[in-house]
Amino acid sequence: MNYDQRMAIISNWFKADIVPRFNMPRDVDARISATDVMEAVNSNIPSPTTPERMGNLLASITKEVARSAKSRTLPTIKEFVDAARVSAQSGQTASHSANSDGWRIDPLEITVKRVREGQAICQSWLSGIRRTELLKHVSEDQLQKYDLYIAAHTQ
């Protein structure tokens, strides 16, 4: 997502979730306050991100800010930044494991790389269906040293 797309989502969130919940500060222009908060939130949301993940992070920020608010006046920018950081860090593990931003761990890819580099691999890759899958990417000769190692330790 580019800057304009992110800011559009954040602007909609601010209007729908934050404005009805909090009063704007009296001595500061409401537009400036809103812009400052939206810019601060945007700069503390990890990139790259998807619209779905962005929505989840913004919902989490809303909950965190509402929970920690001391009054019904718009919380400070620092409170929004802190909430954004907490939300981004707590959502990081879940987002990666759910593949929401395209990043994922591929055990097969890691094992193939380790075999090619002669590094240790898990014994479960040396038999059954996992071995068959591994042999699609490496040769039987490359696995031979692992077979010898297992044979030596089972005797």
Image: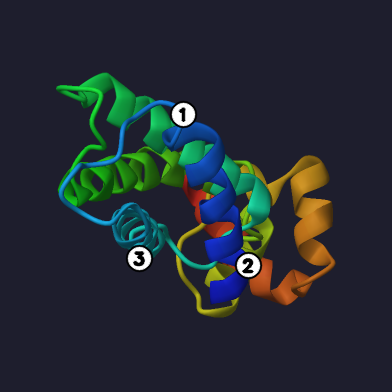
Give the image location of residue 39, x and y in percent: 36, 64
Residue picked out by circle 1? 20
Q: Disc 1 or 3, which lies upstream in sequence?
A: 1
Horizontal arrangement in the rendering, residue 111 relative to residue 88 (left or right)? right
Residue picked out by circle 2? 5
Residue picked out by circle 3? 43
- Cβ–Cβ under 8 Å for marks 1 and 3: no
Residue at the spot 71% in from the left edge and 75% down from the top edge: 141
> Closest to the observer: 140 or 74?
74
Q: Is residue 1 visible?
A: no
Between circles 1 and 3, the one closer to the viewer is 1
Cα distance in 3D space between marks 3 and 2: 13 Å
Cα distance in 3D space between marks 1 and 3: 23 Å
> Closest to the observer: 126 or 29?
29
Quadrant including the N terminus? bottom right
Give the image location of residue 148, x and y in percent: 57, 59
Outermost residue, bottom side: 117
The amino acid type found where label 1 is placed reads: Pro
Cα distance in 3D space between marks 2 and 1: 23 Å
Q: Disc 3 or 2, which lies upstream in sequence?
A: 2
Q: Residues within 10 Å of mark 2 (few under 14, many from 20)?
A: few
Residue 130 got which mark? none
- Quadrant of res 82: top left
Q: Residues within 10 Å of mark 1 (few under 14, many from 20)?
A: few
- Quadrant of res 139: bottom right
- Cβ–Cβ under 8 Å for marks 3 and 2: no
Q: Secondary structure at mark 2?
A: helix
Q: Disc 2 or 1, which lies upstream in sequence?
A: 2
